[in-house]
Image: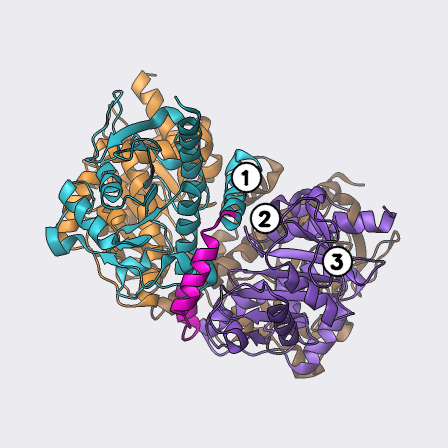
Chain colours: A brown, B purple, C cyan, D orange
Amino acid sequence: MPQDLHALLGDLVIANRILAHEGVLDDFGHVAVRHPERPDRFFCSRSRSPELVTRDDLLEFDLDGTPTDPKGLKPYLETVLHARLFAARPDVKATVHHHAPAVLPFTVTDVPLRPVFHMAASLGGPVPVWDSRDEFGDTNMLVDTMAKADSHARALGGGTSVLLRNHGASNAAHSLPALVFIAVRMMQNAELQYRSMSLGTPRFLTEGEIRLTADMQMSERPLDRAWAYYRARAGYGGI
Amino acid sequence: MPQDLHALLGDLVIANRILAHEGVLDDFGHVAVRHPERPDRFFCSRSRSPELVTRDDLLEFDLDGTPTDPKGLKPYLETVLHARLFAARPDVKATVHHHAPAVLPFTVTDVPLRPVFHMAASLGGPVPVWDSRDEFGDTNMLVDTMAKADSHARALGGGTSVLLRNHGASNAAHSLPALVFIAVRMMQNAELQYRSMSLGTPRFLTEGEIRLTADMQMSERPLDRAWAYYRARAGYGGI
Amino acid sequence: MPQDLHALLGDLVIANRILAHEGVLDDFGHVAVRHPERPDRFFCSRSRSPELVTRDDLLEFDLDGTPTDPKGLKPYLETVLHARLFAARPDVKATVHHHAPAVLPFTVTDVPLRPVFHMAASLGGPVPVWDSRDEFGDTNMLVDTMAKADSHARALGGGTSVLLRNHGASNAAHSLPALVFIAVRMMQNAELQYRSMSLGTPRFLTEGEIRLTADMQMSERPLDRAWAYYRARAGYGGI
Amino acid sequence: MPQDLHALLGDLVIANRILAHEGVLDDFGHVAVRHPERPDRFFCSRSRSPELVTRDDLLEFDLDGTPTDPKGLKPYLETVLHARLFAARPDVKATVHHHAPAVLPFTVTDVPLRPVFHMAASLGGPVPVWDSRDEFGDTNMLVDTMAKADSHARALGGGTSVLLRNHGASNAAHSLPALVFIAVRMMQNAELQYRSMSLGTPRFLTEGEIRLTADMQMSERPLDRAWAYYRARAGYGGI
């Protein structure tokens, strides 16, 4: 295995552990990363809780969500969700689907989730909502078919984040550190917006502030600093 | 002791520790499992906090809540609650009674608890409420007699969950992993519904979504995955 | 030192640690216990955070709050608060003064704190509120004089609990295990009442339920069970 | 290095760890302390999360925010925020800038943050709010220039605390223990005020209570007690 692929798969395990440790993921939810050499392939764990994922659980998939070598392991039922995000968005290198508790109220009500503090600028404008009932009626609520996964990818559009009605959320980013940054901030922003709306009338970031702040935060120094912090907290030591 | 009984009692200890670790149970509350060979018997700890329960604390009871061999230990005052659930519901193999903090507001107000996210589909429709005052007037609030326990079992009916006014909740399931899944989701759903109602007007799962999602989640893959996660978090290692 | 006094002082250290571990106490707040042989004496730590208190920090005081042997250590500025509770209430053997975060909103608003679940029946009816401004005007907010401490003891009256406006709360009980039980339940009840009032219109326990439930819970089996649980969580092992 | 400087830098590391442990700081935010001999110099970590800061990360700066010896390390982008607070306030010896989650709703809405319990008297009256848009329009939200840092220092004025709109807060104090005390209490007060306003109509401390209580708490005994508690919790043992 090439050195950079080896390192990337190590980071995929760490990203699983970080997002479990920070409360974005619990027994369900999953993280994926695109193959660094073959853009039509990506990696994701077999069906296992992110907090328990190891290198041995990782499988390679094509963009239909089919494992290139199943190794006798069962994938997540929603692996295709990641496959169709990678298919729709060549710029995206890492994805996560989760049910972060603070985010869920924004999937249950029609209150739009929007950046209320600078750290969450990367959410962009109001986060779009995908409702499985619109195209598919009553379902088992999973994004477990090509049709549902393509519909879900269209809802994400060109952004970083999408909400799933009465279900959860997905994020997409250009790297695993950027993905962790965005998913954690989405959770924090949801908590803050919830509290701010209980307390009074929230002011949101302006469009200019969102653009300037997101550009700054998606750069090397903030992402390195955040990644070092989160990996240390998840038990992987400092840099 | 037969091998499957030995394993089941090990799982009963683990279920106690899991539900304590996840905050469903604290110093009070209790878990029970039906005897795999003798449907007129079940197992439950002596009067001890679930976080501290070991194999040596487990007692066998009949369906009146009488220990078949007390071993000089004091049972929980509410052991009969479990006895009468097992008597009323042959399909039920595992039960828990708890005071999960997030659930309690739905026992204090008349707001119905209903599934607001897919993970809690197994709660079914609005969860019924048992009010000890209806048949028994002012009491010490415990379900500590045959009459109260039978009344409580009637309130549960054919479902998985019942609320006790100003007191707590009980869950019933076809296995210990299913019981843990349902009790944890009840707690998460209560938190989510509380927050959603503060934030705006909640949308609930449709009846079709509840049925399709509950069927899927009560199957082997999701239950195995959740059980492995919760037992690891409670200190019992991965699978 | 007699054996029972030795054991009681050990329990006083454990009660300090328990109430810190459960979040009733933080860097401030204090616990006291009456001398088992000399009802005109009690024990309390020198000025030190409860989480750090050891046997070597304990001092003996008379009912004016004066140390019988200061050992060169500085007592808490509010030691007299405990002294005057012991003076006013011969039935009381253990006291705590704290700023439990969940309780504080009931000292800031005029919403009465009342039992909303069975575990908090020992709070009794609506908890009385002591306002330092009523008799003493603007102060440093401490109960640090005989006059203030006597006024505070009058507000407690014959009950287990009193609130201090914009400041905190005090509890009194017949033993350290009962004190821990009441202080933890006060905190849980405050959280539950807060949430229930956000969610809808709370139903409270009836007077009959309060009496019957408090009598049952202040008995040996529930108090032993809770004490074993809390001391294990605070690092002192099971019984 | 003189002994007192050596000890002060040790305390700066500990203050970083304490404020991370207590949840005032996460991956972002920073703490600074003035040089004990040279009032035109101060110390602050290189760009690193406070939970991970060690002695080797500390750099010395002048009051323009320029490192006197960069050692090849990258400073925080907002180091100048601290520089200009030290320049504007000769009485201030220690500063922190943070995004404590409980505080943030008061930067998002126009509800003034004010002391609602005695422990937060040192916040003073309603905490002033600095809005970067007033003088600088749309920005990347950072206090990363002399002009912005001077404006931010003017907003702090002669007090201990200032809020930054949709961003965070800064505190200033006469020592590191006082700084930790104030920052933790600001967070607790924000949580309490939020809850109190949800529950009913809050009563605030009077001006007389604020003055008398703050004077008492900023004295040796309370500050020593709190510092010993927080450093023990952050893993630095008792005193």
Picture coordinates of residue D115, whole percent (x, y): 24, 54
Instruction: Indicate the quadrant where residue A82 lies.
Output: bottom right
Residue B27: percent from the left, percent from the top?
Answer: 54, 50
Q: Report crowding for label 3: few under 14, some 14 to 19, many 20 or more residues within 10 A (C-alpha).
A: many
Mark pair 2, 3: CA separation: 19 Å
Label 3: chain?
B
Is residue D158 something one can see in this rendering?
no
What distance separates the C-alpha of mark 1 from that of mark 3?
A: 28 Å
For the residue carrying disc 1, how many other residues have a C-alpha within 10 Å: few (<14), some (14-19), or many (20+)?
Answer: some
Q: Nearer the viewer, mark 1 or mark 3?
A: 3
Residue D157: mark: none
Tell me the amino acid under the disc marked 2.
Ser
| Image-quadrant location for residue A133 | bottom right
Q: Tell me which chain the residue with mark 2 is part of.
A: B
Circles 2, 1 touching at the beta carbon (< 8 Å): yes
Instruction: Identify the magenta region.
Output: C192-220
Task: Quickly name the residue at label 1.
Answer: C232
Q: Position of residue C203 (x, y in %)?
A: 42, 73
Name the dominant secondary structure of the magenta segment.
Answer: helix
Callout 2 secondary element: loop
Q: What's the distance in space between the residues labelled 2 and 1, CA to CA?
A: 10 Å
| Image disc number at residue B42 | 3
User: Left of B214 or right of it: where is C95?
Assistant: left
Residue B26 in sight in this render: yes
Q: Dot 2 corresponds to which residue?
A: B49
